[in-house]
Amino acid sequence: MPKYDFERYLNVRNANTPSFGPDGDRLSFLMDTTGVPQVWRLDSPQTWPQQLTFEEERVSFADWSPERDELVFGMDQGGDEHTQLFRLDGDGETLTPLTDHPEAIHNWGGWSHDGDRFAFTANRRDQSVFDVYVQHRDEEGDDAELVCEGDGWFIPAGWSPDDERLAVVEMHSSFDYDVYVIEVESGELNHLTPHEGDVRYQNPNWAPDGDALYLTTDKDADTTYVARLDVETGDLETVAEGGDWNVENLTVDDDTGRFVFGVNADGYTELTVGELTGPTDYDEFADPDLPRAVTSGATFDTDADRFALAVTGSTQNTNVYVVDVETGESERWTDAATAGLPKSSFVEPELVRYETFDGREIPAFLSVPQTEGAAATEDGGMPVIVDIHGGPESQRRPTFHPIKQYFLNRGYAYFEPNVRGSSGYGKAYTHLDDVEKRMDSVADIEAGVKWLHDRPEIDPEKVVAFGGSYGGFMVLASLTEYPDLWAAGVDIVGIANFVTFLENTGDWRREHREAEYGSLDDDREFLESISPTNNIENIEAPLLVLHGANDPRVPVGEAEQIAETAAEQGVPVEKLVFDDEGHGFTKLENRIEAYTTVADFLDEHV
C-alpha cells in the first residue's frame, strides 16, 4: 500500500455542528477547510458550500435564529477558551460583536422562540462561577441583563415554550449535575433536583406544554436513561432505558414532541427516533439509515420533519447527515474532503477485552495495519502505539482519527484502551479510579501492554505511550511506574504534578477537578506521591512533550517542569510549545508541525 505524508492526513476535513436556518431549507455547519473550524452554509445536499466566516481563530459553534436570516457564533483567541459571541447575517456579509469581555467565558444558551433575545452564562463577575444572562439581539458589549447569579458552574439549557423561563444545569463534577428553572422576569431560581451523593441530570429539553423537562439521568441506576421531570413537583418518571448502556444526546422538539436520542453501545451510537404520545409514552419511528458509527449534535428543522446530525466512524471522516424523522431515510449533505486519501486505506478497529490485575475485563480498540508496513521489524512484529484518552471521565470511541490512520499506514499497530474511570460503561466503572484509586487505572495500562505482548503481530520491545490532557498524565505515570514496558512516550498538554495543576488551573474548573482527583486541602500528600514529577527518577524511555502556551485547563508550566526534571535524569527529552494554542492544537500549521515532530521522534527512537 502506498505511504502518505502526515500533512495529507492532517488535511482530512471534518464537517459537524449543524444548525437549520429559520425556513428549514438551509443548513449551517462548521468545517475546517481553511485550517481552523469556520461557519459554512448549504442550501441543498452535496452542493458547493458557501463560507460565511473567515477568521484566523476557531469557531466553536453557530446557531441560526428561529425567525431571522442570521446566526450567532462563538470564537476565542489563541485557544484561551474565552469565547465571545458574534451575530452574522445569513450571507456572511454583516458581522456584529455581541460581547466585549475578553477575560470571560461565554456559554451559549440559545435563542428565544421569537428570535428577539438569547441567553448565555458567563464568568464575568467572578472567574470561578457562571452567572445567567439574557441579551437582546440588537444589544452589544455590556448591555446583557444579569438574570441570576450563580454560585457554581451554570450551563444554559434552553428557553421554555412561552419564553418566560430558562432551564440551566449546574455542574458540580463530571458525575454530579443539578437542574434548575429560572423565571426570566424575576430571576427566581427553582431547584428541581435536590439529591445526596452523585447523580447526573443532563440534556434537559422542554416538553411542548412547558410543564416538564425531558432529560437523561442515572438516578438510582448504574447507567443513564431518559426521564420526565415535572417542573412543579420535581417528580421523576422513566421514559426510556438503554439497558446496560448509557443514553446520551437527547433532543426533544418542544413544539411537536418529536425526539431523538442515542444509546452508547460499546462506543457505537444506536439511535431511537420517536414522538411523545403522553407524558411518558411514545411511538417509535423507523431506525435511521445511517452507517454504524458515532453520532452527535442532532437538531430538528422548523417543522421537525427532519433532523441533522454529525456522523463519524473509524474509517469515515465526520460529515453532516439529514434524516427523515418518519421514514428514517438519510442523506449526507456535506462532502468533507479526505485529502485524496483512499477510504479503502483506512483501518477499522477490532473491539477487544483484556483481563487486568483484579480480574476485571477492560474494553479496548485494537487496529492492525492492512500490510506489514515500513515500521514492522524483521521478524514480523510491529511497533504499537498505546493511545490513552483524556478526561478521565471520557471514552475512546470508534471515530475518525487522522493521527491513528497515519501511523497505521506507516506500519504501527494502534491500541486504545478504556481503562477504569472511563465513561460509557456505567456509574460504578467511572468511579473505580477516584482519588486514592488513581493508580489502579495506570495498572490497567500495564495489563493492556502485557496482553499486547502475547499478540504475535506486536513487537514487545517497541511499545509507545501516547496521550493528551489527563491522558498525558497517564503517559507520564506509565513511564515512571512501569519503565521497562516502554520504548518512548508522547505527552500532549498533560498533567505532570496534580498539586501544581490544581493550583494553577482555571478557577472555574478547580472544584469539579478536585471532585475527581482529590482536594488540595485533604489529599495534597497523596497527590504529590502519585505525581510523575516526583517519581521521575524511574523514567527510562525517551520523552516528547507538546503544549499550548495559552492552555487554561492544564497550564504550560506542567510541560516545562516535566521536561526539565526528565532531562535532569539523563533521559532524551524534546519539548515543543505553541504560543497561539491552548488545550490542544487547532490551527492546521501547528497541527502539522506538532504531529510531524511526533512522527520524527518515533522514527528516531522506535
Image (cartoon, helix red, strand yellow):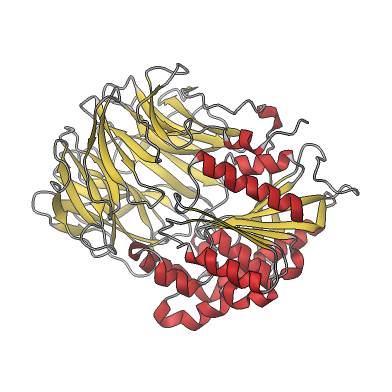
Image-quadrant location for residue 478: bottom right
Image-quadrant location for residue 61: top left
Farthest residue to the right: give it: 379
Residue 136 appears at what percent x and percent y? 14, 39
Q: Nearer the viewer, residue 177 or 602?
A: 602
Which residue is painted at 56% across and 80% down in the image? Answer: 529
Which residue is painted at 21% across and 56% down in the image? Answer: 233
* Residue 224 in view (yes/no): yes
Q: Is residue 135 left or right of residue 230?
A: left
Tally of numbered discs: 0
Q: Nearer the viewer, residue 1 or 559?
A: 559
Residue 466 appears at what percent x and percent y? 64, 56
Q: Nearer the viewer, residue 244 or 253?
A: 253
Q: Quadrant of the N terminus?
A: top right
Which residue is painted at 81% across and 37% down in the image? Answer: 371
* Residue 495 in view (yes/no): no
Q: Is residue 492 left or right of residue 539?
A: left
Farthest residue to the left: give it: 186
Q: Quadrant of the C terminus?
A: bottom right
Q: Is residue 96 left or right of residue 214?
A: left
Residue 141 appears at what percent x and percent y? 17, 45
* Residue 481 versus residue 589 in the image, above or below: below
Which residue is painted at 67% across and 26% down in the image? Answer: 342
Residue 140 appears at what percent x and percent y? 16, 41
* Residue 554 versus residue 599 in the image, above or below: below
